Image: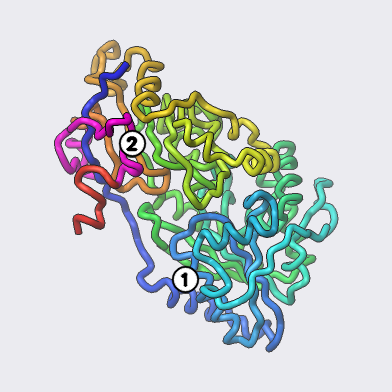
Amino acid sequence: MDDFPLFFRLRQRFDAPEVADVAGEVETQLSRLNLAERVRPGQSVAVAVGSRGIAALGTIVRATVAHLARLGGKPFLTPAMGSHGGATAEGQRRVLESLGVDEATAGCPIRSSMDVVNLGLASEGFPVFFDRHAFEADHVVIVNRVKPHTMFSGPVESGLLKMLLVGLGKHEGARVYHSATRRIGFGRVVASAAEVIRRKTRLLAGLAIVENARERTARIEALLPDEIAAREPALLEMARRWMARLPFKDVDVLLVDRIGKDVSGTGMDANVIGRKSNDHEAAEGETPRVRRIAVRGLTPATAGNALGIGMAEFCRSRVLEQMDREVTRRNVLASGHVAAAMSPLDYKTDRQMLAAAIESLGECADPCAADAGAISVGPRILWIADTLALEELECSAAFLDEARRREDLEALCEPRPLPFDSAGNLPDSVLGWGEGTADERK
C-alpha cells in the first residue's frame, strides 16, 4: 500500500506549572532542611544522579553541589542508574556526561564504579545492595524525578525510593530487585529494601523533581530521609496530573521519531502509549489504544541501548543498525523485561515502513463513528518526536473533526501530504517539518 492520508499539525494545551528559577528553588528547598546541623566541614557527600533526561538536570545538580559545598561538605557525584550505561563504570560516567553533567559543570568529582556493598537481607529474604562509593561517604543525597513507572503501578513508582534501591543498587541490585518484584510485587520490595537502606546507610536528603507536559521543571521538593516515603505518593499524583499524553484514545498507527533511555526507562513511556501491562496492546480499560507502533530511530544519549524496541511492531532498519545488542541485552536481563529487546519488522525507508504498518491494519473502523460499522476517512495515525515531546505533533486527517471540536486542541494548518524525500524518508524530526516548532513561531 502507498496511499497515505493527509496530515495536519496539532498543538495540545496543557496545564503546565513551571519553576521560574530552578537554581534558586533548589537552594530554597535545601536551605529549608537545615542540613548544616548534620554536615560537618570536610565530610564527604555522595550526590546520586540517574540516567533520565531530566529538565535542567545540570542546573539542579550544580545548585545541589554548591549548597553542600557552602556547608563545608566535600560533595562528589555517583551514578545511580542500575545496569544502564552497559553496566560499566565508564559507561555510566558517559551517560552522565551525555545528560550535561560532568565534573566541570557540576563543580565536583565523579566517582563511578559498579562495586556494591551487601547490606544484608530484607525481611522477604532477598539481599540489599548499595553503591560502595555512596556507602563509604559520610552522607548521601539522592536527586531524581518522580513520575509514573512504565511497568509497576502503586502509590510509589519511579522516583527517590526507586533510585535508592535500583539506581544505587547498580547492576547487581537492579537484577535482584526486579527478580524479587516479579515474585512479591514492587511495593513490598520498595518498602522492605528501603527500610534496610535507611538503617544501614547515611542518607542525608532527597531532592524530588516533578516535570510538566512541556518537559520543564514544575516542582522541586527537598525531603529529609523520614519524609520521603510519606511524601512521594503525593508527588506522584502531581506528576500524573501534569504529564504529557497522546490527544486521542484510539490510534491505528503511532509513528515515533526516537526512543531511548533518556526518554523513558522503557525507551518510550508505556503510560503514554497505553502498553503498561502488555507490550503490544492496551489492557482492558487502559487508554490510549494503539494498534501499531513504528519507530524511526534511537536518541544519541541512549548510546545504542534500544530497550523498548520490542514494544513496536515496525521500525526502520537503521534502528537495528544503531542498536548496541550487548548493552541492550544486559539491560533487559537485569530488568526482567526480556521482550523489550525483541526486534520488530524492519524496513529501509519510512515510506516502506509506514505502508506496511497501514497494510497490517486491514480496514480501519472508526471508533468514534455513530454507526459501528462505518469506515473512517482513513487510518488514524499520529506522528510524534518521542513520548516526552507531545505538545505538538502531526495527525492524519481522520482526527481533524474531533480536534476542531475540542477546546484543549488547536489545529495549526490544513491537512497536507507527508513530506517524503526522493529516497522515501521523512524529516528526521516531526518538529522540523511544515510550520516549524512552537519556539520558532513565538
Q: Residues within 10 Å of mark 1 (few under 14, many from 20)?
A: some
The residue lying toward the viewer, choosing from 257 and 189, is: 257
Q: Residue furthest top?
A: 373
**Image position, residue 141 (x, y; %):** 63, 70
Q: Residue at x 42, y 24 (%)?
A: 291
User: Can residue 234 be seen here?
Assistant: no
Image: magenta residue range: 402-431
Determine which residue is flagged by label 2. Answer: 383
Magenta segment's dominant SS is loop
**Image position, residue 64 (x, y; %):** 54, 75
Residue type at tag 2: Trp
Q: Relative to residue 252, is residue 92 depicted above or below?
A: below
Tell me which numbered mark, 2 or 1, is placed earlier along the sequence. Answer: 1
**On the image, which quarter does residue 199 sit in?**
bottom right
SS category of the residue bearing label 1: helix
Determine which residue is flagged by label 1. Answer: 59
Q: CA distance from mark 2 to mark 1?
A: 31 Å
Image quadrant in which the C terminus is located: bottom left
Q: Residue furthest front?
A: 422
Q: Residue at x 55, y 31 (%)?
A: 310
Counting labels gives 2
Q: Residue at x 17, y 33 (%)?
A: 415
The residue lying toward the viewer, choosing from 319 and 129, is: 319
**On the image, which quarter does residue 6 sit in?**
top left
Q: Is residue 40 magenta?
A: no
Image quadrant in which the N terminus is located: top left
User: Can residue 374 be seen here?
Assistant: yes
Q: Relative to residue 391, is residue 7 depicted above or below?
A: above
The residue lying toward the viewer, choosing from 32 and 244, is: 244
Residue 373 in the figure: left or right of residue 315: left
Residue type at tag 1: Thr
